[in-house]
Image (tube, coloured by chain):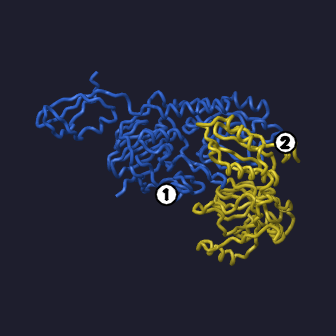
């Protein structure tokens, strides 16, 4: 479903968000093309780095632009953004230029690692093994990082295993937990409260404030979950702790 | 031994906070930082610190801190009935906390959060370019946690301290009332609410509830209607002061510890100039929202900042009398200086030439009464 406003070919709108930021809105829905335009524009703006620019927060469908509002007016910033929008010939170039990297996350499914696997399978009317095969059979696109440090919002999950959130969120979800909420899937990089159905856990550390950038995954990356046994989980966990685990990265389609 | 601040008791919540952790929101990292950024700024200005230096944000009081060395400090923000070794302290002015002295904050008299700024700032290890503590993601402060009894906080080098006695002018201090008018810039998803929903938002009184924290102020009051009952959006980024309205129709004002993105429609964003009022709003405080344009909000923000930066923190020049002894002869001098310099002049030495004789004199006693 999309309205005229949401067509990727329409120019994005620039909307004030309070007195220190504007939102550049490319659409109102989850869509690969819209998401690509957000990140292409963020790249173009970063490259130009106008003196009023403070911080960029790209999301599924929009780019929040913080600016120096003590010195620059809303009208000035809006006009410059609109000029950049109309002048940008690069909007669709990013996808073509960028190799599409798939990050493989070894994941132990079920049991203590994924206490909700059985109920996800039951909800889908399949057995647990099938649910794991479906979940691990897709490379998921990272649309944005948000909610908590390094949390990837992943799209493209098979509707067969879509499951509502837990009626009562857990007060503590262990770091590395892989979850499902409706037709989204994601990984909790750090321990936090959360209401997603937990089907597995990866020992890979997705956020480390001593790394640059601190988040391993970036929007535009893809993620594939690779099922492993508990014994291998322990091995990988130790390797991660020693700092000598490297995430396997491949190109999409290979 | 380096100068330290020893935490004897943190009260319900004491946190190391600076101006916030910007530039990492794209990685899901919350900004955090002082909930009342203006109080932090003024505290640092009073001492002569860098304006974004880290301070301690004390919520609700019940906290106790000991200074290991003579330290210039200032308290700003909410009035938590502070005292130094039992003597009541005034907010909004710098003072010297002597080595071994204990600063205590009893509990709120007015406002909720006090900022203890110290010369050189709190010098914990920066994480992602900030010392601000974000407890739920365990970043900043000491090991990402709130302060605990027994914590020892190192202070940064005191470089350009202005000494004690600086004062933030009374006429510039914000009035803290139990009924607030909070200005809001509409958008970015105000079109998702019904006309009557918008009308409800700007014409009703909302009350701050107990379930408010550094992440957001949860308000109670009339429900705000959304078109087709659709309160959800495809998640986008949220700002300090964003007013989101979830499915129950009750607004939540997102504050410093907010998550970076959110999936509820936002009816508006609070003007920066009014954020300090929200930081000090206790449960029960009544809020009325007033519509304002982004440009108007920017003018107000700039005026306020200019007023703060241009404020005369040192007070007017005063002529005072000083007694001193020159070669055994008691003399009295009239001196013109600023009040804050007075406290530091007592006991210092100067060179004086009287009747051709040069001698080192000691300024013994200053009578702070103006001569005029």
In the figure, A128 relative to B305: above or below? below
Image point (65%, 75%), residue name: A234
Mark number displayed over residue A5: 2
Q: Position of residue A87 (x, y in %)?
A: 77, 44
Residue B250 in view in this figure: no
Nearer mark to the viewer, of 1 and 2: 2
Chain A image colour: yellow
Q: Would you place residue B318 above or below residue A30 in this image?
A: above
Label 1 sits on residue: B125
B343 sits to left or right of A51: left
Give the Cα distance between marks 1 and 2.
47 Å
Q: Which chain is blue?
A: B
Q: Is residue B308 visible?
A: yes
Judge by depth and name the residue closer to the eye, B137 or A23: A23
Q: Secondary structure at mark 1?
A: loop
The quarter of the image holding the C terminus of chain A is bottom right
Q: Residue at x 75, y 39 (%)?
A: B189
Q: Position of residue A42 (x, y in %)?
A: 71, 50
């Amino acid at each position: 479903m999309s309205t005229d406003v949401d067509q990727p070919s329409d120019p994005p709108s620039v909307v004030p968000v309070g007195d220190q930021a504007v939102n550049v809105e490319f659409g109102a829905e989850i869509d690969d093309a819209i998401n690509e335009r957000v990140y292409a524009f963020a790249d173009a703006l970063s490259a130009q780095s106008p003196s009023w620019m403070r911080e960029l927060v790209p999301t599924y469908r929009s780019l929040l632009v913080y600016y120096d509002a003590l010195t620059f007016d809303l009208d000035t910033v809006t006009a410059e953004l609109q000029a950049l929008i109309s002048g940008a010939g690069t909007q669709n170039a990013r996808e073509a230029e960028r190799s599409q990297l798939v990050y493989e996350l070894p994941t132990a499914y079920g049991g203590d690692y994924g206490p909700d696997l059985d109920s996800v399978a039951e909800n889908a009317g399949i057995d647990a093994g099938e649910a794991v095969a479906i979940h691990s059979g897709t490379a998921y696109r990272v649309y944005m990082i948000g909610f908590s440090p390094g949390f990837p919002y992943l799209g493209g999950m098979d509707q067969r295993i879509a499951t509502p959130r837990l009626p009562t969120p857990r007060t503590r979800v262990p770091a590395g937990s892989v979850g499902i909420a409706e037709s989204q899937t994601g990984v909790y990089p750090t321990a936090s409260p959360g209401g997603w159905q937990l089907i597995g856990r990866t020992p890979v550390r997705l956020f480390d404030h001593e790394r640059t950038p601190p988040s391993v995954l970036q929007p535009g990356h893809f993620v594939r979950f690779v099922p492993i046994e508990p014994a291998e989980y322990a091995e990988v966990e130790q390797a991660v702790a020693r700092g000598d685990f490297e995430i396997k990265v491949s190109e999409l389609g290979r | 031994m380096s100068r330290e601040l020893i935490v004897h008791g943190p009260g319900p919540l004491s946190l190391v906070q600076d101006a916030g952790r910007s530039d990492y929101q794209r990685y899901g990292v919350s900004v955090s930082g002082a909930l009342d950024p203006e109080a932090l700024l003024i505290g640092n200005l009073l001492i002569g610190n860098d304006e974004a230096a880290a301070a301690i944000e004390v919520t609700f009081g019940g906290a106790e801190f000991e200074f290991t060395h003579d330290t210039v400090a200032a308290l700003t923000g909410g009035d938590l009935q502070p005292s130094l070794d039992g003597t009541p302290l005034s907010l909004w002015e710098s003072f010297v906390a002597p080595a071994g002295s204990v600063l205590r904050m009893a509990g709120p008299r007015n406002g909720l959060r006090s900022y203890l700024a110290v010369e050189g700032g709190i010098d914990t290890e920066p994480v992602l370019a900030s010392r601000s503590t974000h407890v739920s993601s365990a970043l900043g402060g000491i090991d990402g946690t709130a302060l605990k009894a027994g914590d020892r906080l190192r202070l940064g080098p005191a470089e350009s301290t202005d000494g004690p006695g600086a004062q933030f002018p009374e006429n510039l201090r914000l009035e803290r009332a139990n009924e607030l008018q909070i200005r809001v810039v509409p958008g970015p998803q105000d079109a998702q609410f019904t006309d009557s929903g918008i009308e409800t938002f700007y014409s009703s009184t909302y009350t701050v509830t107990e379930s408010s924290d550094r992440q957001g102020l949860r308000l109670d009051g009339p429900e705000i209607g959304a078109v087709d009952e659709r309160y959800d959006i495809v998640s986008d980024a949220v700002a300090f002061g964003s007013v989101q309205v979830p499915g129950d129709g009750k607004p939540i004002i997102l504050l410093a510890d907010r998550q970076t993105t959110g999936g509820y429609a936002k009816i508006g964003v609070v003007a920066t100039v009014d954020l300090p009022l929200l930081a000090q709003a206790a449960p029960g405080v009544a809020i009325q929202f007033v519509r304002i344009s982004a440009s108007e909000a920017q003018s107000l923000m700039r005026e306020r900042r200019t007023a703060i930066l241009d404020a005369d923190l040192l007070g007017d020049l005063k002529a005072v009398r000083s007694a001193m002894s020159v070669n055994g002869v008691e003399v009295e001098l009239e001196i013109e200086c600023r009040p804050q310099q007075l406290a530091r002049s007592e006991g210092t030495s100067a060179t004086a030439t009287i009747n051709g004789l040069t001698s080192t004199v000691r300024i013994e006693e200053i009578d702070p009464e103006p001569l005029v």
